[in-house]
Amino acid sequence: MRVINPMEVRYTFPGSVAVGVDLLTGRIFKLSARDAYHGSLLGKITVGMPCKQAKENVPKLYFDETHSLLRIPDEEGVCLEVAEEDPLEETVWNSKIDSITIIETTIYQEMRCRQWE
C-alpha cells in the first residue's frame, strides 16, 4: 500500500494490477493493468509499448496535460500511464506505457473537487 496524496491510496499486487482507493470514502475508483498483463487495449496498445508507437497505432491518442495521462477520445475513463511522475508532453512520447488504466470518472471528479475545497 502506498499513499499517493491526501485523497488516494494505491494497492499494488505483484506485477499485474494496481487498485486506487478514495481515502475518504473507501471506494475503488481506479484499476491499472501493469507489466504482467498480456492483453491489449483496442487490440493495438500494450503495456511496455513505446508511447510513440501507441500514437502511430491509434492516431487519436493525445496527452491530457491536466491529468498527466494519455487518453483516447470517445474512450471515457480509459487512459494510459507512464512511469514518470507528472511527465511533460515533450517527454511523454519518448516514454513507455507503464499501465492501461480504467478510472471511474464520477468518483475521480468528486475527489478532485474535494482537493480544491
Image: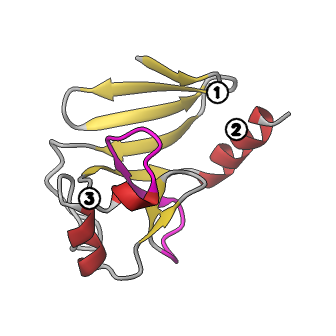
Residue annotated with mark 1: 7
Work out whether residue 30 or residue 47 is closer to the camera in this orientation and state it. 47
Residue furthest toward the bottom?
59
Neighbours of disc 3 within 10 Å: few (<14), some (14-19), many (20+): few
Q: Amino acid at mark 1?
A: Met
* Residue 23 position by quadrant: top right
Magenta part of the chain = 73-88
Figure check: 88 above or below 26:
below
- Comes first in the chain, label 1 or label 2: 1
Residue ID at (80%, 37%): 116
Residue 40 appears left or right of 70:
left
Residue 44 appears left or right of 115:
left
Residue annotated with mark 3: 94
Closer to the eye: label 1 or 3 = 3
Image coordinates for residue 52, horizontal then vertical, percent: 25, 68
Figure check: 87 above or below 44:
above
Measure how far apart labels 1 and 3 are at the Cα level: 30 Å
Residue annotated with mark 2: 111
Q: Amino acid at mark 2?
A: Met
